[in-house]
Image (cartoon, helix red, strand yellow):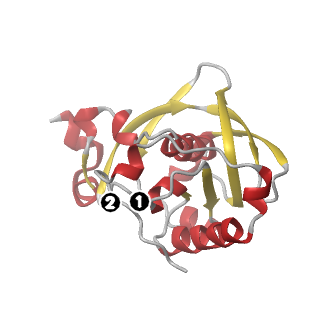
Amino acid sequence: MILKIRQTGEPSLRQYARPLGRDEILSAPMQELMVSMRETMRDAPGVGLAAPQIGMALQIAVIEDRQEYIDKLAPGLAAERGRVAVPFHVIVNPNLTPIGETTATFYEGCLSVAGFTAIVPRAQAVRVECLNEFAEPLVIEAEGWYARILQHEIDHLKGKLYIDRMETRSFMSADNFIRYGSKAISQ
């Protein structure tokens, strides 16, 4: 079932999501929610979706960066961003730790800030300890664009949006990004 994606200004996007226990994760309603989140993310389309984006203050996010999305990028852009396909997975109750001090700065968008983009600095590599959809412990070490996706989605679970971290002069509509690109902020 496709769920409504909440837009900035909705209270659910600014709440700190609550963790889930093992039995709750394995319950039929939560398992169904994870399937609906996957369908909603793909329908949007997006590479991640956190429960607060659908109005639920739960520490659940779904992530998938499909090869077909990467293939649509301009030549060289995937390599510049460190972007590779990431299979579908669920993260529950994540704890994120940056690896090293290297950061990367790229334009980023969000399904809950529809139609806009901005430059956002993020850690280049991260370690995430969490549970998967079966309430099993999972450790993810990621770098490049995958690390960015994880940080973005985990921010949602803490009531944060990319606009809280963006370089404010870079904020623009997606249409203007296509029209002007990074030249828009240098003027």
Residue at screen point 42% across, 70% down? 4
Q: How crowded is mark 1: few (under 14 residues within 10 Å), some or many (20 or more)?
A: some
Q: Is residue 37 left or right of residue 16?
A: right
Image vertical order of residue 75 relative to residue 41, above or below: above
> To which residue does mark 2 refer?
114
Location of residue 34 in the rendering, given as x and y in whole percent from the top left corner: 65, 66
Q: Nearer the viewer, residue 167 or 11?
A: 11
The disc label shown at residue 111, or none: 1
Task: Please state which amino acid type lies under the numbered disc 2.
Answer: Ala
Image vertical order of residue 136 relative to residue 158, above or below: below
Q: Which of 142 and 48 is in front in this view?
A: 48
Location of residue 53 in the rendering, given as x and y in whole percent from the top left corner: 45, 57
Residue at screen point 65% across, 33% down? 96
Residue at screen point 67% across, 70% down? 29
Location of residue 84 in the rendering, given as x and y in whole percent from the top left corner: 65, 53
- Callout 2: SS: loop
Outermost residue toward the left?
Answer: 187
